[in-house]
Amino acid sequence: MSERKPLLKVNDLKQHFRINRRFTVKAVDGVTFDIYPGETYGLVGESGSGKSTIGRSIIRLYEPTAGEVIFNGVNISGRLSSKDTQHLRTRMQMIFQDPMACLNPRKKVIDIIAQGLDIHHLYKSKEERKDKVFQILDMVGLSNEHADRYPHQFSGGQRQRIGIARALIMNPDLIIADEAISALDVSIQAQVVNLMKDIQKKTNTAYLFIAHDLSMVKYISDRIGVLHLGHLVETGTKEEIFSNPIHPYTKSLLSAIPQPDPIAEKKRIAMNYDYATSGIDYHKGTNQHVSGQHYVLATKEELEKWTK
Amino acid sequence: MNYERIIHIIFCAAIGSRMELQMERKQILSINDLSISFQTSAGVVNVIRGMNLSLYKGETLAIVGESGSGKSVTVKAIMGILSNNGKINNGSIHFTYQKDGKETQQDLLKFTKTVMRRQINGKRIAMVFQDPMTSLNPTMTIGAQIMEGMIYHYKTPKREAFQKAIKLLELVGITDPEKRMKNYPHQLSGGMRQRVVIAIALSCDPELLICDEPTTALDVTIQAKILELIKDIQKKTGISVIYITHDLGVVAKVADYVAVMYAGKVVEKGTTNEIFYEPRHPYTWGLLSAMPDLNSTDDKLYTIPGSPPNLLHQVEGDSFAPRNIYAMNIDLRKEPPMFKITDTHYAATWLLHEKAPKIDMPLELRNRINMMYKELSEGDQETMPPALNKELSEGDQEAMPPALNKELSEGDQEALASNKIGGIIV
């Protein structure tokens, strides 16, 4: 693992939003992690923890306040030259949460998917453009005749496939999936997750998978980062996080996952975690190494207390 | 009192001697043969195709199914808020409620929209919607919104309504309620807003609370709190609750009874334990298998092949057959009736016919259920459905799927030509 070069390195990323002179929202406050080629990094946390903000800062929908983002060896957090912008916009793609809202209702599927190609002039003839779209449609499990339809003619799961196809056609190294399956039914979620895994096997694309549903994150991710109030409180491989959660927030998140087991479920009480009363100060903590790739944001005393 | 009630009591007592448990249950809602269609530009869509369900006082019923299976349309029919192109073709919805201190039973479908709005909606049946931001009025304080219903339905004096609103906010676990009364929805977090919506729903002491995906828009930690809150309230007030959800984990936590819907019909219903530990319908197997399992290390999730039928077209036979790997010839020809498994457990699949091959649920699902069983303490094991109890005590081999019953070679009934069709029929 150590010889591999990370595809994306996020270093002490901060994203603050100034509301007025006295008040600034610190949505992301010093987050560090990296993603290796072909792996899936799952980012979980409650709403307002800053997980979507991280995704948007990385792809430069926001201007990061501080810290650096290094993608494919290029620093993309500061001012971008047009060459770097081109690099970023083609090699990194995003899939959004609501498949209806993110597809232009007035465009045919073929034009939606080919838009990236159009912008970057990535084909020589109309035929080539069409072929490329058909190839991608096939990959996401849609057929050629779907290309001439409009988004409203599809079901939710199919629309999300179109969103995935649009991201894939640029042949990216990294796809940021921001709650890509949250709006779908359980059975459809499973289909989309399986599809994303299949594609990853074929194309070796890395995913940054942002979600609040831990059970799905477990299926798709290799490593998981747990985010709370803009701080990455715990990160590690999925086995490390699920079998040996250390941080009380991770524990409370894990305890809140509903399971299809009525008797156990009715007796189970979710663990409560309240940052304000817990006496934990995220600013004091440093990344403490637990084992393997497992790190926890804590002070030495806290770590001792939690691992006991 | 009237004769009907006396006869009813005697009848209940007679049954009660056989089934003590059932005696105290009082039916408050019963849906009979409901069928609803929508007139669309593409043609008539039969959304609900003959639905039967009942709900008892103080109990929780969960309706689960994919989107488009008709869950939301069902509750909209109960509330009388179907959109204008919706048409109720058949059936009745009998609702028992208190009117002027007397218990009355009425068919809700006979009421006009005005009567529904004045007498039922918000007063006797309240509803909690998915997104708390869109169901609250952003220009009114939450206090005014909670009081609104009481003043409209009961003409409660303002001061009294104010006091009651504070009590309700306390009930739903909002600290410092007096201060919060003056807040606007945007000043509250998502979980708090949903609590306020629940307070509004409870403000007129309804008999029935309908929760349409109440926690889908919230994250897991807050979801757990809201679900516990609704359960708590139910214990205190004895209200009946209908949950609509596609999240089976939520169902396991809150429901007493579960109805699984597919393509406008209830395909399986039973107690929560029966549905989760001893499911009989292949669709229920599929739904349960598709749930990610935290203990498993598989890297592929199970999916149900294919997609739901288009209800614009007439469905021949069993609507689930095209996606069912256990489908038999009869499934394509004739719609299965509800087969009775226990007094509370019913499923609509030909697999339960006595001449059908005996097929158990997929092995992985069976293993998962056995795992859950092992983790339970002994006291709990007794509350499991008896079928499972027996099977497990006889050893794990028993729990394996029995090979296809050889009976089928003798099965000479024409209607049940039960050769198994492998794979999916397109």
Image (cartoon, rainbow, N blue to C red):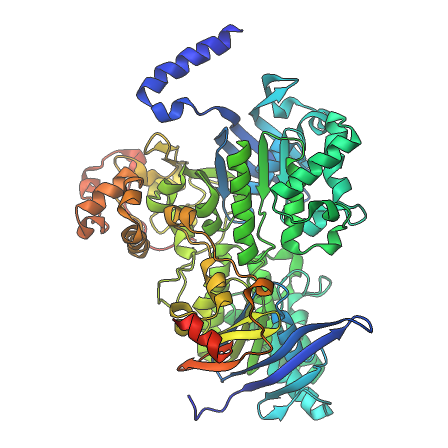
Q: Left or right: B380 with respect to A280?
A: left
- Residue B8 occupies quadrant: top left
Q: Where residue B49 sits in the image (x, y, percent)?
A: 52, 35
Q: Quadrant of the N terminus of chain A?
A: bottom left
- Residue B367 occupies quadrant: bottom left
Q: Left or right: B24 with respect to B2?
A: left
Residue plotted at (61% across, 21% down): B98
Q: Nearer the viewer, residue B355 or A177?
A: A177
Residue plotted at (32% across, 50% down): B421
The relative height of residue B42 versus residue A131 in the rendered view (above or below) is above
Q: Nearer the viewer, residue A213 or A248?
A: A248
Q: Is residue A121 visible?
A: no
Q: Where residue A184 sits in the image (x, y, percent)?
A: 55, 57
The relative height of residue B105 versus residue B334 in the rendered view (above or below) is above
Q: Where residue B334 sits in the image (x, y, percent)?
A: 40, 36
Count the labels in the image: 0
Q: Nearer the viewer, residue B355 or A38?
A: A38
Q: Quadrant of the C terminus of chain A?
A: bottom left
Q: Where residue A84 sits in the image (x, y, percent)?
A: 68, 90
Q: Nearer the viewer, residue B95 or A197?
A: B95
Q: Is residue B209 visible?
A: yes
